[in-house]
Amino acid sequence: MRSLGILSGLIVLAADQASKWWILHRVDLPGIRQIVLLPVLNLTMVWNRGVTFGLLTGTGHWNALILSALGLIVVIALGIWLHHAETRWTAIALGAIGGGAIGNIVDRLRFGAVVDFIDAHIGAWHWYVFNVADAAIVCGVAALILNSFLRRRRA
């Protein structure tokens, strides 16, 4: 199970960092600011100096280091959990969460902020701008919750 979780994490990390490289260096979204892709989807450049929903936002160098350290603690805890994972879905979900967390840690250490660029919206109502790592974290958490409910139901 461990190798499946590690593979899942590496795939998420590679996809996340490749998408951010593409947005920064090929699309040059920081210079353009926004590209409308669909009536419900834009590429919008945001440098997130906080955590989810912009919480704990700070502009100093220490903020990025503290958030990176907290993220690393979470990744270590996920690694311990992965070591004891009993199902494939748990291993894949933990890998996705860990890979996403590492992707955002890499951004904080490189740029002092996380590169966010996916802007899903309905009309004038916009969800927060996110990235591939964030999506993997949310999907991984959802998979863990769903797996937990299904296992209880079977028991």
Image: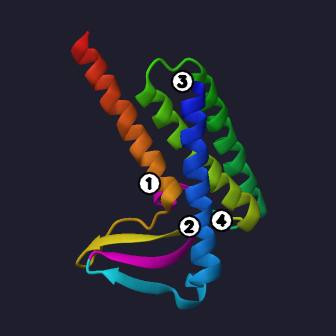
Evaluate if marks 3 and 1 touch, with contact meaning CB atoms under 8 Å apart. Answer: no
Report crowding for label 2: few under 14, some 14 to 19, many 20 or more residues within 10 A (C-alpha). some
- Tell me how far mark 4 sits from mark 1, CA to CA: 17 Å
Q: Amino acid at mark 1?
A: Ala
Seen at 67% across and 50% down, the residue is 67
Residue that label 3 marks: 1
Can you say whether 111 is above or below 85 in the image? below
Left or right? Give the position of 51 relative to 108.
left
Evaluate if marks 4 and 1 touch, with contact meaning CB atoms under 8 Å apart. Answer: no
Mark 1 or mark 2, which is nearer to you?
2
Report crowding for label 1: few under 14, some 14 to 19, many 20 or more residues within 10 A (C-alpha). some
Q: Amino acid at mark 2?
A: Ser
Seen at 57% across and 76% down, the residue is 23
Report crowding for label 3: few under 14, some 14 to 19, many 20 or more residues within 10 A (C-alpha). some
Mark 3 or mark 4, which is nearer to you?
3
Residue that label 1 marks: 135
Q: Amino acid at mark 3?
A: Met
Nearest the eye: 145 or 24 = 24
- Tell me how far mark 3 sits from mark 1, CA to CA: 22 Å
- Tell me how far mark 4 sits from mark 2, CA to CA: 16 Å
Left or right? Give the position of 94 relative to 106.
left
Give the mark, 3 or 1, whose residue is nearer the N terminus: 3
Quarter of the picture holding the C terminus: top left
Q: Position of residue 20 (x, y in %)?
A: 59, 68
Magenta stretch encompasses residue 41: yes
Q: Position of residue 145 (x, y in %)?
A: 35, 31
Give the mark, 4 or 2, whose residue is nearer the N terminus: 2
Seen at 46% across and 63% down, the residue is 130
Nearest the eye: 19 or 69 = 19
Circle 4 — which element? loop
Residue that label 2 marks: 19
The region drawn magenta spans 40-55
